[in-house]
Structure formats: structure tokens, C-alpha cells
Image (cartoon, rainbow, N blue to C red):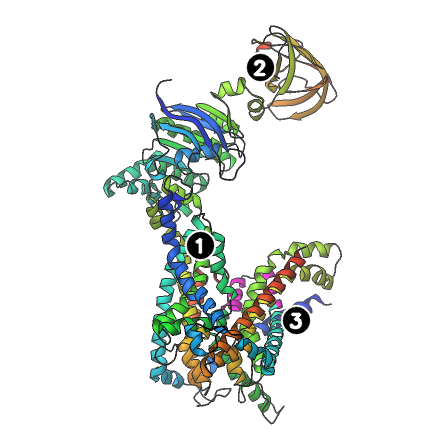
Amino acid sequence: MADHHLEIDNLVKTYPGALKPSVDRVSLSLPRGEMLALLGPSGCGKTTILRMIAGLIPVTAGEIRLDGRGISAIPVHKRNMGMVFQAYALFPHMTVAENIGFGLEMRGVGKAERTERVLKALDLVKLSGYGERRVSQLSGGQQQRAAIARSLVIEPALLLFDEPLSNLDAKLRDEMRDEIRDIQNRTGVTSIFVTHDQDEALSMADRLAVMSEGRLEQIGTPRQIFDRPRTDFVASFIGAGSFLTGTVVAPGRADVPGLGILHFTGDVPAGGKARFLVRPHRFVLGEGVNAFSGVVEHVVYRGQILTIAVRAGDHRLQADLPTHAATLPAKGDRVTLSVAPDDVTLVGEAA
Amino acid sequence: MDAKLARFAFALLITLLYLFLLAPIIVVLVISFDTRQYLAFPPESLSFGSYAKVFANVKFISAFWRSLGIGLFVGLVSIFAGLLLSLALSRHDFRGKGAINFLILAPFLVPHIVLAVGVMLVLGPLGLLDSYSGIFLAHLGITTPYTVRTITMSLMAVDRRIEEAARVHGASPAMVLWRITLPLVRPGLIAGAVIAFLISFDEATISLFIVSVKSSTLPTEIYHYLEYSTDPQIAALSVILILISVGVVVVVERLIGLRKAL
Amino acid sequence: MAAVRHSSSDGSSHRGMLLLLLLPGLLALLTTFLLPLIWLVRASFASSAVAALKGGDWTLESYRTVLYDPFYWKVAWNTLYLGVNVAIFAVALSYPIALFLARTKSRWRGVLTALAVAPLLTSSVVRTYGWMVILGDRGVINAALQSSGLTDGVIRLTNNYFGATVALVEILMPYAILAMLSGFGRLNTQFEEAAALLGANRFRVFTRIILPLSLPGVLTAALLVFVLAISSFVTPRLMGGGRVFVIGTEVYNEATVTLNWPLAAALSVLLLVLFGSVILIYQRAMRALET
């Protein structure tokens, strides 16, 4: 891609006194208008990256470029970033309108224009009429909207979200998820949001950057990340599944000890070892190319699906079965699970 | 044991203890309305005579204004110095921070009478004994630790993300301080100033070592008066002092809660 | 302010800003706290009042005076005796109040706490005066005793150690209550309920749960009251009417009446040393309690 709006190049952050870097040589880039999710468990360095982009903490090494120009030397307040904080960080001593107008005021925008732009921003986040309220008079979702408006009104170069939905209850979270995506689509602002919630990342972002222990594990579209995880970490962090390790005996065929021959698509030279992942919903009940039979050890009924764990050889396979079948397997039953070669994900070559 | 009886006994005990704790204040209040010239209880008849006498006593009135002026000035300077120190301590990391923290706490550990002798010995050669600047300096030393403490507590209560949000959205460091941090710690600032004022206004120990005629404060005037006489005039004066204290207590309790401030 | 916190690019302006922030407060503390203490120690070794101000000679004369004069041994004993008595009574009388405030669920809790602590913010001169009125020869107690016919003559309650002790107990109680309230953080009614469910009666709940858990707070309160009591002088002087001799009154006497500044300084230094040792003992005791 030619027009990279934001480029992060070998970014490193080591806190003073720390043995390991919090962010370790991370490189990624965003085209204009994209929404990227930084996904990972807590402490993986995703928030640190966000704070370095915002300028809240200095960079140890590497570069952050905006439209081709390095921004590391620009102080926070001159970077023109918008940021939505986890607990919103609205100014408690100001009204909603004053909060939203704050950035404009700092930029020396005149009062009349300020008022007008604040009203527009309020409208954009569906908070029209709430301008004169105190922050404490707003609900959690409304505070979230006000925080987004505060960041959008300054027409930021980037809009940064730090765990934006984690302070909301489940129902509101789904609603705000769509809302944020909708606002982002309409304004076209290049956005990065940090989250530890895979559903949030998969459903909201154009692309996902999965991080672990300061390193970037994989970056790609939600589909690529989910269906073609390149590392064990990505495969296990996003979605569930059964991991299988085998020796490739012929093109597209691997011998998995304690299970049997596994057919897959993808080229690994014969003789090499490889790691495979089968997502639970890829398994079907009955005979097929890759068929493994075993005893049902565990059954969890989840409404639309039935999750079963099957002991097959030395392995425990997890499968999600649709519940519309006439009879469902019960604990202790002997069943056969099969999976199409196309549905076997090659995670990587193992040592 | 009968639970009801035990509860009643405990309630009675608490009431009696509160009575003991508040006894001098109550008694002073009652006796300030006595008409007699000497100290006695209960009062024979009630009047505002003692108050009239206090207001006619030039010594007391001028000492009152002096104490008020010194207290206000001490309060203001003390929160200024305290605010800067608190900002340095709560928003910056630097070497020697521990030493400075100790230096701020140390005055709590040194008895005022010891400090009084030292202050007297320092002010003497400078010609500052019995001067406003002398009392001001002495009081500043004992009030600043309190203001640093109240302001630091208020600063710590401010969510750092709020300051960060202001910075990200375009506020320079000075603007963050002026528009965000200061308004948010205002209760702590006012509480600190009010407490510093009161400590200075009520301070007797150090003042007694460094003032005589020219710069006598209200507490030192009362002390010297009490050495010879205990008439109800002092009770009236005390009530005025108590009222000022009550005002301070209410303000501080409203702003940040009394327990946090002390 | 905060913008410069970690930034390495503008380290010099950071340092300048920091200096600017620290300077006024540090200057104030230096001239009003550190300098006086240094001067005090120096003056305690001076041979005369003039030398105490100007500096110059060093002598142990003042300390020798204090250590060899039986009067000062008596004064030290009086001070300790007063301090221990005041600490014991103030803590004993404050404990129920603090316990009550820590555990009550009454909506008056805030007001009652303020009421218990607020006397801290009234002048100790005023409250001492209050006790002079209560305990005086024609004060509240004597008047009540005489009118009820219990006594004919006057019972001496002021101008002696008794009066000073009572007044100091009351004046220092708010400190004790405050210290205990902070120390009672660990007291949780759940422990008591658990103990009661396990079959402990009220007495055992108190001795086995409440008392041990509140001990650190009690210890802190005792220390605070003790150190404040042994360094007090306004209350012992006024309540004692010149008949109570403690370190505080003697320091004041030497400093303002006799004008023997080296001796006043030496007595102050001794008080400071006493202070330091008590605080050290307290720290040891607290550590022992924690382990």
C-alpha cells in the first residue's frame, strides 16, 4: 500500500529499570481511514503503543511517522490526536459542551465557531440537548459518546481508543460497538483501538494486530486472523480449537502421533513437523476424510450449539455441533468426528 | 449479660465521654454570659457584658487584628509554597525526593517547644524577635507541612487520565495546570489555607517565645492575661475564637472531610 | 507540569521547572525548621547567652548543669510521670469513642466524628482556660460539691499536677481518637460476626478479636499523646499556676525569664533525644506487633 497514513517502524519501549522491553520492535502501518484493533492480553504492550502514538510517553527506539514525517519529537499537545480513555477521563468540573469545546479552545478557535462545532459534534454522537449537563449527570454510555465527541471535534489526525468499551455493561457494549464503527465510517478518521476482547476486535476493526509480550504476533483482517492464525498464540488467544502436531509424511498428509493421519492443504516439505489447528465448529459428526472416533468425555449445552470433548487416541478434540439434529451425543457415547482438509489450519512448522 | 442493658451502658459511657471532651468549650460558652467579675459557676445572671468589655479592650482588639492578618498571610503563602512542593512531589520523579518527603514530615515529629527555642535563637541575631516577619516565618514553618499534606492528598485524588486527556486534546502543561489540575484540587487548596490560617491564628507555644509587646498575638495576650486573672472577659474572647474554629471545621469538613485534613 | 515527567528531550527545562517548584517550600522549611534545629544544637554548647546567639565557643557546661542538678532530675521525672499518666488516661477514655465511631452505622457518624476531632482545631489556650473554670477553686466542680453539701471547704483541683493532667488528657484526646480511627482500619464487623458464629461470647469476641486488632492503633495513639504531653508547656504552666515543673515550663522559663539560652537549648535537645528514643521504641513495638 502506498498511502500509509501512520507508520510505526521498529518501535521499542523499555521502562527504566525493566529487564524486558514492554514493546519490542513493533512495525505496522495504517492506510488513511482504516480502523485497526490492537488486541492482546493485559500487559502485552498494546496500551503502551497507543500512549507512545499519543505522545504521553516517550519512545525508547524506533519511529512513529504520520504522513511520512516523524512525530516523536512533537510534544503531546501539538500532535493533534484524539483519544478516548478507558474511564472516559471527562473533565468533571466542566459541562458536556465545555468538555467537547476544550480542544477547540486550546487551539484558539473563536467562541462562535466553537459553539457551532460543539453542537455538530453533539449531534454526531447523538447527544443533542445534553450540552449544558454536568458530566456526572450522564450515564456511562452517554459519557462514552461525550468523550468521542471531545476527540472528534478537533478533527484529529488519528483517533485513539483505549479499551473504550470495558467500562460498559454487556448490552450497552454491543450498542456502542456498532455506534463507534458507524461514527468512524461517517467521519473517515483513521483509528486505532486497544482491546483485550477478541469479539470486539473481530467485529469492529478493519484489521487486527495481535500482540503478546511486547511483540506483534500477527496483523491481518479479522478473517485472516481467525482462519489463518500464524502462531500458536494467535490461534489460542482468538477462538478455541484443538491443536495437533504431526510429521509431514507426504504433501498434504501428516502423521499425528496418537491420532493417525491428518489430511491438510498447504505445502510443508515431507519430513518436516507442523502444527495444526481445528476450530470446534469445523468438526462434523460422521465419517469423512479426516475421521477420528472416540468417547465423549464432556458435554456442554449452549442453546444453538452443543460443545463436546471427545477423547480420540491421545488427544482431546473439541467440537461445536449444531443442536437441530434429532439426537445429540451424550457423555460416554462413542462418536466419530471428521474435518475437511481445507478446514485444517496450518499454524506453523514446529521445531 | 443482658444485651439491652449492655447497649444502654455503652451508650451512656459514650455520652459521658463526649461530655468530658466538650466540657471546657461548653463551660466557657456558659460563663461568657456571666455578669460577675470573677470566675464562678454557675452564672448568676446572663448578659453580654463580657463581650462588650472584650470589644472595648484595645489590647485584645489590636491583638485580634494582628493575629487575623498574620494568619491570613501565613495561609496564603503556605498554600502557595505547599502547592508548588506538592506538584513537585506528586507529579515528578527526581533524586532526593525521599529526603524532601522526610523534611516535610519531620516538623510533625519535632515538639513545638523545641522548635520555639530554635526559632528564637535564629530570629534573635536577625533582629526579627517581636516582629511580624518573625512570627510569619515561624508560623510558615509549622503550617507548610499541613498544607503540603492536604494538597498532595487532593492531587493524588485527581485521576491522571483527566490531565492526560487535556494534554492529548491540545492543552500545554501550563494550561493543564490552570484549567484542569488547579480547579480539581481547589477544595484541597482552600482546606489547606483554612487550616494553615487556624494553626497560625491559634498558635501559642512558638509565639510566646518570640513576641512581646509590639507583635503580641491573641493567644499570647490571653495567655499572659490568664497568668493573673481568669475573669469572664476571657470566656467571651474564647467564644469568639471557638466560633472561628467552628467555621473552619465546617468549611474543611464540607470541602475534604475533617479526618483527611488533620 | 506532567508533560515533562519522563521526557528526555528537554531535561534541562525539566530540571529548571522542578527547581522552581521546590524552591519556595524548601526555603521556607529550611529557614523555619532545619536552621532553627541546627542553631538550637549549637546554642546548647555555648557558654553564654551572647555566645548562643553569635556562636563561637563550645562547652558542655549546660548539659553538666542539667545532669548534676537534682532539680532537673526531678523535672525530668515529673515530665515522664505526667506524660505516662496523660497517655494512659487519654487512651483509655478515647478507646470507647474511637471504637464506637469505627463501628457505628448511625447516620450521625460524620457529625459525631467531627465533634470528637474538632476540639483539635480550637486553641489549647482556650481549652485550658475552660479547665481552669471547671476545676478552679470557685469553679464548676467545687461549686457543685459545696451546694450539694458534700464538702465545706475548697478542694484544690488546679495549681497542681492533677489539674494539669486532667486538662492535658482532654486536650490530647482528639489526637488519640484520630490516631485510633486510622489504626482501626483492620477492624471489620465480619471478623466479629464470624467469631460469634463460631461460638465466642461478647467478652471473648472483644478480648480475642477486637482488642488484638485495635492494638496498633492504640499504640500509635499512646505514642502521640505521650510525646505531645511531655513537650507541652502552655497547659502545665496555666493549670499548674507555677507549681508544676516539667521540661516545657523550664525551657520557657530559661528562655524568657532567666534568659539562660544555652540551658534552654540543652533542655530542648534532651527533650528531642527523649522524643527520638520513644519513637524508636514505638517502631520496635509496632514491628513486633506486625510479626
Confirm or deny contact between disc 2 and disc 1 (CB under 8 A).
Answer: no
Cα separation between marks 1 and 3 = 40 Å
Pointer 3 chain: B
Q: Is residue A206 visible?
A: yes
Residue indicated by mark 2 = A346
Secondary structure under tag 3 reads helix
Name the residue tied to disc 3: B9
The residue lying toward the viewer, choosing from B247 and A39, is A39
Does the magenta portion include A265?
Answer: no
For the question of whether residue B251 can be seen, the reply is no
Question: Mark 2 Cα within 10 Å, few/some/many (few <14, many 20+)?
Answer: many
Tell me the quadrant of the picture where the C terminus of chain A can be found: top right
In the image, C260 versus C92, the foreground residue is: C260
Are the residues under marks 1 and 3 on the same chain?
Answer: yes
> Cα distance, mark 3 to mark 2?
78 Å
Q: Label 2 lies in what chain? A: A
Going by the numbered disc 3, the residue's amino acid type is: Ala
